Amino acid sequence: MTETLLGTGTAAVQHHVDLSWNASTSTVTGYNVYRGSQAGGPYSKINSLANAATNYSDSSVQDGQVYFYVTTAVDSTGSESLNSNEVSASVPSP
């Protein structure tokens, strides 16, 4: 007697954190997004170039972690503003 076994896999869920903010009232060329693993920093910049939009999707997050984010506005000379307020995001475990 022979049995036939079939199986299918499912891809792991790819979590991401979607951020959005209000546009600066100053003339800016874009925004930098920073992420930390604890409240109050330290933070590391996660975008390679200043983001012209007022939103960002961080797809490099890990399941079961909490992340803390701030943004800065960047002007045409490359100068950055002070950090925005901090927000936190909890990424669910699978």
Image (spheres, helix red, strand yellow):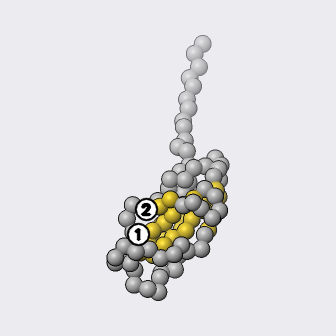
Residue at 63%, 52% in the rendered image: 65
Q: Is residue 20 visible?
A: no
Query: Could you say whether the residue bearing mark 2 is in a helix, strand or loop?
Result: loop
Query: Could you say whether the residue bearing mark 1 is in a helix, strand or loop?
Result: loop
In the picture, the disc for residue 51 is 1
Q: In this picture, is 6 found above or below 28?
A: above
- Left or right: 93 with respect to 60? right
Name the residue tied to disc 2.
47
Q: Pointer 2: residues within 10 angstroms few (<14), some, or many (20+)? A: some
Residue at 56%, 23% in the rendered image: 4
Badge 1 vs badge 2, beta-carbon distance below 8 Å: yes
Q: Report how far apart the C-alphas of labels 1 and 2 lie in the structure.
A: 7 Å
Residue at 47%, 82% in the rendered image: 24
From the viewer's side, name the closer residue of 36 and 62. Answer: 36
Q: Give the residue type that dot 1 points to.
A: Asn
Residue 74 location, x and y as percent?
41, 75
